[in-house]
């Protein structure tokens, strides 16, 4: 069942990544005061559930292979707000405009977000396929075991 559990953790992470991307796209045109704290692009940081060094199985200094028995899936490590400066747009009639007439919008690249969305969807699909293959393998192993 390890393969299915690992794929499940990846599905969970990628689903959360899709949520973050959709939140970025939904707030791409959210105006804020130039000096205020408006919306900032969010980026999801993921990684192995355990410290990566725990996966290396050679203590004698020889070729550090991966100890498959220790694989434990992935997790969301953090969600980090971008430190990019806001995109300033001259809108003197906007109630959020500063004295010079500028309104701050988050610096979010729609193309980059859509590319991330497609990539994340593909990773999600790949993990679904891997989970289904593992389920089929476990089922066939049970069938073979019941025949003997």
Image (cartoon, helix red, strand yellow):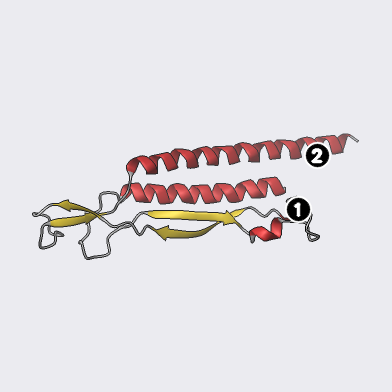
Residue shown at 35% from the left, 50% from the top: 24
Q: Label 1 neighbourhood size at 10 Å, few (<14), some (14-19), many (20+)? A: few
- Residue 68 appears left or right of 91: right
- Residue 119 appears left or right of 4: left
Instruction: Please say if the residues under marks 2 and 1 sit with CB atoms less than 8 Å apart.
Output: no
Which residue is tagged 1?
69
In this view, the residue in front, 135 or 77, is 77
Residue sitting at the far front: 61
Residue shown at 48% from the left, 39% from the top: 119
What kind of element bears circle 2?
Answer: helix
Foreground mark, 2 or 1, reads: 1
Looking at marks 2 and 1 on the same chain, the residue that comes earlier in the sequence is marked by 1
> Residue 91: x, y in percent?
12, 52
- Residue 97 appears left or right of 20: left
Residue shown at 62% from the left, 58% from the top: 49
Residue sitting at the far left: 93
Which disc is residue 26 wearing? none
Q: Label 2 neighbourhood size at 10 Å, few (<14), some (14-19), many (20+)? A: few
Which residue is tagged 2?
142
- Residue 48 appears left or right of 141: left
What kind of element bears circle 1?
Answer: helix
> Residue 146: x, y in percent?
86, 37
Q: Is residue 24 above or below residue 54?
A: above
Question: What is the spatial separation of the Cα atoms under label 2 and label 1, in whole angstroms?
Answer: 21 Å
């Amino acid at each position: 069942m390890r393969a299915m559990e690992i794929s499940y953790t990846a599905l969970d992470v990628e689903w959360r990544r899709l949520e973050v991307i959709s939140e970025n796209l939904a707030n791409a045109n959210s105006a804020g005061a130039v000096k205020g704290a408006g919306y900032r692009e969010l980026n999801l940081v993921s990684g192995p559930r355990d410290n990566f060094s725990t996966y290396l199985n050679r203590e004698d200094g020889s070729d550090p292979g991966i100890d498959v028995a220790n694989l434990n899936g992935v997790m969301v490590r953090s969600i980090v707000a971008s430190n990019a400066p806001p995109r300033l747009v001259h809108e003197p009639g906007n109630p959020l405009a500063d004295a010079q007439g500028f309104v701050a919008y988050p610096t979010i690249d729609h193309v980059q977000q859509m590319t991330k969305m497609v990539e994340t969807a593909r990773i999600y699909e790949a993990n679904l396929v891997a989970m289904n293959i593992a389920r089929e393998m476990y089922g066939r192993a049970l069938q073979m075991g019941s025949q003997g």
